[in-house]
Image (cartoon, coloured by chain):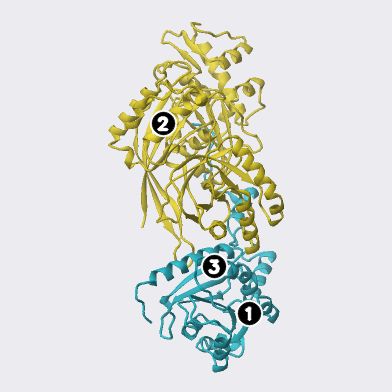
Amino acid sequence: MPETMLSAGIDIGTTTTQVIFSLLTLEMSGGFGTAPTVKVTGRDVFYKGEPHITPLENDEYIDAEGVAALIKEEYQKAGMKPGQVKTGAVIITGETAKKRNARQVGEAVSRAAGDFVVAAAGPDFESFLAGKGAGADILSRRTGKRVLNIDIGGGTSNYCLFSDGEEADTGCLDIGGRMIRIRQDGNVAAITEKARRVLEKYGISVREDTRLTRNMAERIADIFARCLAEAAGLGRISPETRYLVTDHGLSGKEKPQIITFSGGVADCMSDSSGNLLRYGDLGVLLGQAVARNPAFRKMAQVPAAETVHATVIGAGSCSMSVSGSTILCGKLHFPMRNVPVYPLPYREEEDLKLLPEKLWEVTCRSQESEDEVFAVFLEGPRAPSFREIEKLADILTEGLPLKEKVIPIIVEHDFAKALGQAVRRRMPEAPVLCLDGIRCGRGDYVDIGQPVGGGIAIPVVIKALVYSADDGIRQSGCRIIPEGYKDI
Amino acid sequence: MNENFEVDLKPDTYKDPERLKSLKMATPARIGIGHAGPRYRTRAMLDFWEAQARASDAVRSEVPEEVVKSLGVFEVRTRCSSKYEMLTRPDWGRLFDQEALDKISRNCRHHVDVQIYFGDGLSSPSIGANIPDLYPALKAELEASGYTVGTPFFVRYCRVNTARTIGPLLDAKLTCVLIGERPGLITDESMSAYMALNARPDMSESDYKVVSNISRVGMPPVEAAAYTAELMKKMLSETEGAGWSK
C-alpha cells in the first residue's frame, strides 16, 4: 500500500525566492521471498509558487524577516501548514549563499517549514538539484548518453553532468543574469567585481553609470556565453573562465553528448521579442547570447523539463533518498540534522586491519570540530562473510563512542541489517542506527528523517554544506535571526 | 532550440561500447551477447552450455561428505536412496525411515524455540556456499535475543516438507530448513529459508514463510540471516501469550 509524503522545496536564490510543494509516493516493494524495500515511485508537483524577488537587507545580509513573510504567504496560498509537510529542502543558492546570515536563515526556515525539511547550500548540491529538477538525470538514463544540465540563474551557472541517471560531475561559474544590473535607460546600475575584471581584459570598461549601447551589451553577453561554453567542455578553457569558477569546474574527463538549459536565463534563450532590459539586468541578453553561441549550437540540445523552477523542484522532490535495509533500536530522535559523515576505507577484508587507526583519527577529528553527532560511511564488499561482519562490529564498537551517543553507520552495499544486529549484540543497551543503500563522500552531511514503511526504511538527504568562508555562525546572533520564524 | 541537429533519444547501444558495458554491469542477465546470423555466437553458446551443465550438476550431484563434516553437523537421509529417486519420488523426499528419526531424536536438543537444519534440495553447491555465513549469523542473532536454537543437522535428498516431520519430532516452536533452490542459468548456489510455526504433518505449503534468492549474487548470506532472524523473531513474538495450540 503506497504511503505519501508532502514535500516542500524552497529556493532562496540570488534574484528570486521560490516555493513549490509536491506529493511523494513511497511504495513498498518485495515481500514475497525477498526483503521488503521502500522506494519513491511518484513525484507530483502540485503547487508552483511565483518567483519573488529575494529580500535583502543590504549587500551582506539577507532580510530574514522578509524571507519569512514571503514563505508564510506561499504556504497560505497553497493552503499548506508546516505540520503537514514531512520532507523537502531549503536551499540557499548563488550569491545569496555568500551572505553573512545565509546559514542562520536557511536553518531557521527549514525548522519552520516542516518536520524534515533540510537546510542546504553549496554549488555542488545546487547543481545536482537543478539537474534533477530539469530532468537531465532521466534523460541520461533513457538515452544512455551523457547529459549536461546548465542552470543559469541570477548569480551563478550550475553544471551537472549525468551518466546513466547518476550524477557524474558538477561545477559552478559566477556567471548569471544579475552580474550586471542595467537600468531601463541603458545605464549600468551595478556590476560584480568578477564581471568588471573580465570585461577589462577585453578593453571594455564598465562600472556604475556606464551607458551601454545595445551592441556593447550584446558583445558583453557573447563573452560570458563563450565562458559558459568553455566550462561545459566545448573549447579550451581561457583564463577568464577559470577566474569565473566559483569553487570548481567540471573535471572535463567526460564530454557531454546532450545539453539541457535550466534556470531563469534559459527561459530568455528563445525570447526575441519584447524589452531586452525587462528584468533590469543582463539576463535576456545572456540567454540570447547562449542561444547563438557557435559552440553550443554544435551540440545536441534538448529542452529541460523545468527551467526557472528546476532548482526548487529538485529541492522539493528529488532531495530525499530512502535507505535500503535498516536497523534501528533504542532511543533515537528524528530528524537528525546536519550530521557530518566521515568515510572509512573498507572495501575488502584486508582493509579491516587499518580500520582501528582510521577510527581513532575520525573520533579525534570529530571531537576537534565539536560535532554533536557524526556518522560513519563504509562502502564494504558486496557479500561480506559472517566472520568479517563480526570483526567489523568488534572494531566499530571498540573504536567509536557508541554508548555515549548515536553514531549512524551508513553502508553502501546490502549488509546493514547484519552489521546493525552484530553491533547491537555487543552493546544491547546502546541505541543503534545502521542503514544501507546510501552512498556518501568526503565532506558530505546527511539529514535523517522519521522511519517510513512501518520502520523498515529511513529517509535520508545527502548534501554538502558550504557557506561562504566567513559565515556568520560565530557572530552575535541578535540581528541574524529574527523571532518571527516560529510561525511561518 | 537548435534546428540543425536532430537529437537521437533512442539508446544506440551497439555504437557505444561504453553504454553497453554499463548496461551489462547493471544486470546479471545475458544481454548484449550479439549473434551470428540467426544464432548465438560461439562464446555465448558455450556460456549457455556451461551454465546449463552447472545447473544440471547442481541438481544431480551429491553434497560431499567433507562439506558436511566441515559444517560440524551429523547427517541423515530421507526415504530416498539416490538423487534419482529424490527427483522421481517427491513424496519420499519428505519422509524418514525410523532409523533416521531415531538418530535425529537422539542427537538433537528437544523443546527448542527454533530448530534449524540444512537440506540439499535441488542445489548441492548451495550448502557449502551459504551455510558457513548464513547459519552462524542466524544462530548468534536468535540466541542474543533470548531464543533457544536446536542442534543443526544435514538432510540428504531433502524436500521442504521434511519440516512437517522434524518440527513435531523435536517439539520446536519454529522449524526452519535452509535448502538449495532450483538452479537457474545465473547461479547454481541459491538457497531459500523455509520457516514454519508449529509445523505439523497436515500443514499446507502456504503455512511456510520463505526468504529466497540467498547467494553471493542475490541477497548476501549474512544479510539474509539478519533479515530471516528478524522475521523469525516476529513470528515467535506473535505466538507468545496468544494461547496458541497445535
Chain drawn in yellow? A
Q: Nearer the viewer, residue A395 or A318?
A: A395
**Of the residues tagged 2 and 3, which is closer to the observer?**
2
Task: Residue at 64%, 63% (x, y): give it.
Answer: A385
Q: Which mark is residue B4?
A: none
* Distance (Cα) linking label 3 and label 1: 24 Å
The answer to which image quadrant residue A204 occupies is top right
Disc 3 on helix, strand or loop?
A: strand
Residue lying at 57% horizontally and 93% vertically, measured from the top left: B99
- Tag of residue B73: 1
Q: Label 1 amino acid?
A: Val
Seen in the picture, residue B244 relative to A440 is either above or below; the reply is below
Q: Position of residue A244 (x, y in %)?
A: 60, 22
Q: Chain of mark 3?
A: B
Residue A256 appears in view: no
Find the distance from the CA under tag 2 to the CA under tag 3: 47 Å
> Which residue matches tag 3?
B213
Q: Chain of mark 2?
A: A
* Label 1: element kind: loop
What residue is pinned by disc 2?
A108
Q: Residue sitting at 44 percent across and 64 percent down?
A: A31
Q: Residue A52, percent across and down? A: 37, 25
The colour applied to the residues of chain B in this rendering is cyan
Chain ID, mark 1: B
